[in-house]
Each structure stands twice: as structure tokens, then as C-alpha cells.
Amino acid sequence: MYGAILGDIIGSPYEFDMGNKSKDFPLFSSNSTFTDDTVMTIAVAEAFMDAPDDEGIIRHRLIQSMQKWGHRYPGAGYGLRFSDWLDSENPQPYNSWGNGSAMRVSSVAWLYDDLDTVRRMARLSAEVTHNHPEGIKGAEATASAIFLARTGSSKAVIKAYVVKQFGYDLSRTCDEIRPDYRHVESCQKTVPEAITAFLEGDSFEDVIRTAVSLGGDCDTLTCIAGSIAEGFYGVPTDLKQECRERLPADLRDILSRFDAACL
């Protein structure tokens, strides 16, 4: 999950098209902070760790964990409908195609050891809120790309799988995307761009910089791109340490439990 969390933290100062669409920027500043992307990534990881293979129980755990962490960090930047969901006594999915389903899914790709199960669990992680087909697709595509990356697939194989299975247009280059790309929070306009940034980057850090350079909802876009890049490249030790130092103790504790679960 380091890749997702680092993407969120590094991209956060440049959200809402606040960057200069360049790869030349400081990785960290006083404005670099975790947002709802990190909080919900942690929440989903907690729900899936040690969970039985029972979809009903997993759904209950997801709702319980997401509400718990959302209430613990109420000012993290949630959307209006998700905020209402967090406060509901009987939370129901609300047909969202927002990119929240894709930004929070990364743990699933590490906790399960076959692609079919990863996709099934990614779908479950989305469906408690983002049960629109595009919301589900965004979560499944992201988790699939991470799983393929961490299990040794080439970028060509990952690209071909995503295009065939999910129908995303990955034919554009980042240079073609960048000039007209603006802040948008749908899976349809975030997940393909994040995957493209991963495909073009030549290291973990370069993927992060490439994603931020596209602009838009770039804390979430970079969260998604970083989560895939971690599977492919790993994360440098110094960046892992920086990530941990920028999290409060309770979030850091879940990250440590996740590290142990993935050994």
C-alpha cells in the first residue's frame, strides 16, 4: 500500500489542477499530506486482513471499517455522497462511478494469490458504495494491474489485459493527455490516465512524477498509478520511511499489520 499512500501524499498539493503540469516539482513539501484516499485505503486493508472467504462477512467488515476510519478522520476530503454514506445508520451503495473505488483497492491485490480472487474481492470492495458498472470496473482494473505487476508480468502484458478485459483506451500518450486534462473524479477519466502514467514511467518515482504532471484529481490519480508502480518496481526504502513518518500512529499501525500479512 505504500505506493498508493505515497501517491496520495505527493499528489495532494496539486489536486484541483494546482500544479504546473510538469514532472519537475518537490516530492514533499509542507502541504504534502494524506487525504481520504489514504484513510480509505487503510480501511479496506483492515477489512480484508484475516477475513474469511464469505462475501456477506466481508461486506459487513468493509462497511464497519470504512465508517470507523471515516469518523476518525472526518476532515480528510470525502465527497458529499460518500460523507452521507459514512454517517448513515444503514449505509447502502449509491451507484457511484467515482474514482474512490479504484484508489482504495490496492491491498486486495497483495492479500490474495490468484487473479480471479483478486477481481472478485476488488468487486466486493467497490460494491458497498460504488456499485455502478464503471465504479466496479475501475476497482477491478486497478487491482488486476497491481496483481499482474507484482507477479512478474511485463508492461505489455498488463496493458493488453486491461484493454481486453476492461475496454479502457490506453492508446494515448501522457503528452497527448496532459494539455486538455482537467479535474474529474470518475473512474472513466482517472483510471486509464493513471495506468498510462504507470506504463510510461521508468521507475517508481518517475511514475509518481508522471502522474502528478497530468494534473486533474492528481492525488487520486497518483494514488492509483503509485499502487501499480509499487507492484512493478517496489518502493525505495527512503520513500517508505517518509511515508510512515507522515502518517499518524493509528494509520501506521494498520500499515505495519499489512506488511506482516504480506510476508
Image: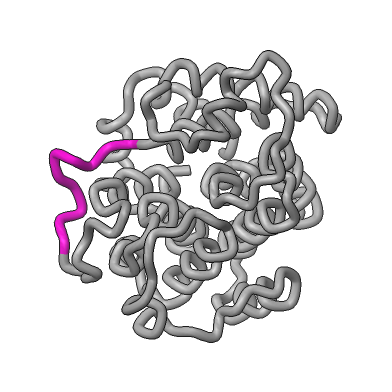
* Image height of 242 relative to 16, above or below: above
Q: Is residue 66 visible?
A: no
Confirm whether the magenta stretch covers residue 33: yes
Magenta segment's dominant SS is loop
* Image height of 75 relative to 129, above or below: above
**Along the viewing direction, whichever of 174 and 7 lies nearer the viewer:** 174
Q: Is residue 15 visible?
A: yes
Read off the magenta span.
25-34
Residue in view at x 23 percent, y 42 percent: 32
| Quarter of image, res 156 | bottom right
- Label count reads 0
Q: Position of residue 234 (x, y in %)?
A: 43, 56
Q: Position of residue 132 (x, y in %)?
A: 73, 50
Residue 253 relative to residue 96: left or right: left
Q: Position of residue 214 (x, y in %)?
A: 34, 69
Residue 234 relative to residue 59: left or right: left
| Quarter of image, res 147 | bottom right
